[in-house]
Amino acid sequence: MKFDVIIIGSGPAGYVAAIRAGQVGLKTAIIEKGKIGGMCLNWGCIPSKALIESAKLFRRISKDASKFGIDGIDKKSITFNYSKAVKRADTIVTRLTSGVEFLLKKNGVEIIKGEAKITSKNTVTVENRSLEADNIIIATGANSPKPEKSIDVLVDVNDLFTDREIPEHIVVAGHDAVAVELAQLFETMGKKVTLVSPSDNLIPLADPYLFEYLKKTFKKEKIEIIYNTSLSDLVKGYSNNKIEVNGESIKCEMLINASPRKAIIPAMDIDIDFDNDFIKTDEDCQTSVSKVYAVGDVNGKSRFAHIGSAQGMHVVNKIKGVKQKLDLKKYPINMYSIPEMAQIGYTEPELKERGDDYKVSEFPLSANGKAMTEGTNEGFVRILSDNKYGEVLGVQIVAPHATDMIAEASAYIQLESTIYDIAQTVHAHPTISEVFMEAGFEAVDKAIHK
């Protein structure tokens, strides 16, 4: 059977590309050997956020209920039921995966179950079926590699969100958003957590200003951080619920593998170029083989689902002859830490390296009325802007709703707005988003409430 485009993998990069391809009239097939929705929908983004919300509610009720005038809650009797929280997450996942499958079918996408093999630049086989396509999009994602040696307490992220007992002492191995979110999830549930990073930075893609804030948060929450130590080091040092590493002894009843991911490469007979552990692509996500593309985690350009989706749509637009630029600096990155963190545009070290003349303006949530009413006034909005013309070059946010608030900053970056535009944009009161306006005023002259 002949298709205009065949997509291998149905995560956010793959299924969004498939839906868009169907919408613009391309005969499309998507191949999936596992569950529709991929890692993000089934084992990552969605279930983890559902559990984080459960944990945040647990903490708020147990610690802050009386502050809000709610009496009669016995803190000693409140417990976190992980099994029930997982069940709630599963319900959400089922609803969303069903929705994705419905949208694929609605837009004429043929869903093919099985493992794909690329046999030529225009041919893919699935078991005994041979499919032809003018274009092939690889969207197979990435996962954390398993260590050579395994131990009984080692749990992969993909297996974490199931009906299981959660012990008291947990070690999370990894860095970036996944590791940070898991560490805070289990700490919020009342567990003793140690986060072990393979590098000297927990969030390498983020501005150092956010990293410094995160370190202070972890210190307050008593989450221990160990740097420059790999998962293999931890496995080697493990014995009888203890890990001996770098002269330290860590109690460990569960070791979570959230280590840096490597691309999941489908079987193939074509010769494509690689960049370390990922498929090498150009600015349009095309591999070294013409009309064979790689989008999402598999190309290593981003670790975020929404950027993978944007890449998928970009490739479909290219196939249809639409010319556009894929600029990663115009896409936000986000982390569901507590409080949340998000950023877009350039970081301060990047601006210094470019030699930009820039200014920094910041406004704290502690001076925001709405944040006070919610009892969630930790954090800030920080704007990096061109010192001469005022163009917004980068935005960083720490706030309970930072991952939602970053959309406003994304619009500023996309529209090449200035700090004057931000300051002159009237924000409803009382809202947390007023901190943008205040940070704009701070850059122009002086914030009103500071």
Image: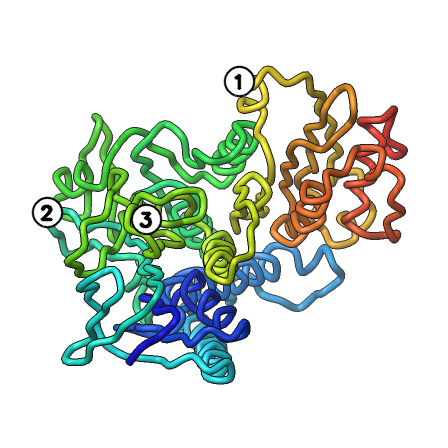
The x and y percentages for residue 340 are 58, 47
Amino acid at pointer 1: Glu
Image label count: 3
Q: Residue at x 74, y 59 (%)?
A: 68
| Left or right: 9 in relation to 115 | right
Mark 3 or 2: in front is: 3
Mark 1 vs mark 2, CA separation in Å: 39 Å
The x and y percentages for residue 406 are 65, 47
Can you tell which mark lies on residue 153? Answer: none
Q: Residues within 10 Å of mark 2 (few under 14, many from 20)?
A: few
Judged from the image, the secondary structure of the residue bearing numbered disc 2 is: loop
Of residues 442 and 316, the one nearer the viewer is 316
Can you tell which mark lies on residue 353? Answer: 1
Q: In which quarter of the image is the N terminus?
A: bottom left
Q: Residues within 10 Å of mark 1 (few under 14, many from 20)?
A: few
Marked residue nearer the N-terminal end (3 or 1): 3
Residue 76 vertical placement versus 277 (above, below) = below
Q: Residue at x 39, y 71 (%)?
A: 4
Q: Which residue is drawn at 37% across and 45% down?
A: 193
Q: In which quarter of the image is the C terminus?
A: top right
Mark 3 vs mark 1, CA separation in Å: 30 Å
Amino acid at pointer 3: Thr
Q: Name the residue under label 2.
A: 148
